Amino acid sequence: MGDSPRNLNVSPSSNHVFITNQNTNNLIILPFQQGKVGEKLQEIEIPKPVCVIF
């Protein structure tokens, strides 16, 4: 999914997990339901992502 995860955060609705990856310059969005993470929903290229803040 990505190389060198830098930050992880759960959406305010608690329905998604957002992970930024330092070496692959991307943000991964995963579904999060009943305490379990599902398959990747979306991958967004972002140069040098640091963190996800809501």
Image: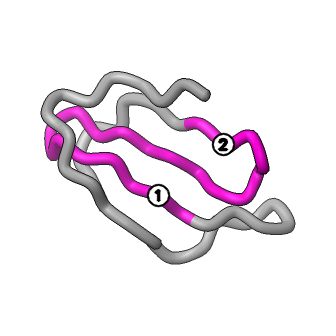
- Residue 50 placement: quadrant: top left
Q: Is residue 33 left or right of residue 39?
A: right
| Magenta stretch holds residue 22 | yes
- Residue 20: image location, x then y, percent: 36, 39
- Residue 44: image location, x then y, percent: 27, 54
Q: Is residue 39 left or right of residue 47?
A: right
Q: Which residue is mark 2?
A: 10
Q: Which residue is mark 1?
A: 29
| Label 1: how many Cα within 10 Å (few below 14, some 14–19, many 20+) | many
Give the amino acid at mark 2. Answer: Val
Which callout, 2 or 1, points at the residue further toward the start of the chain?
2
The residue at the point 77 percent across, 50 percent down is: 14
Give the amino acid at mark 1. Answer: Ile
Q: Is residue 42 left or right of residue 26?
A: right
- Highlighted range, magenta: 9-30
Q: Quadrant of the C terminus?
A: top right
Q: Secondary structure at mark 2?
A: strand
Asked whether disc 2 touches disc 1, contact meaning CB atoms under 8 Å apart, the reply is no
The residue at the point 44 percent across, 71 percent down is: 40
| Magenta stretch holds residue 26 | yes
The residue at the point 44 percent across, 44 percent down is: 19
- Residue 10 placement: quadrant: top right
- Residue 21: image location, x then y, percent: 29, 40
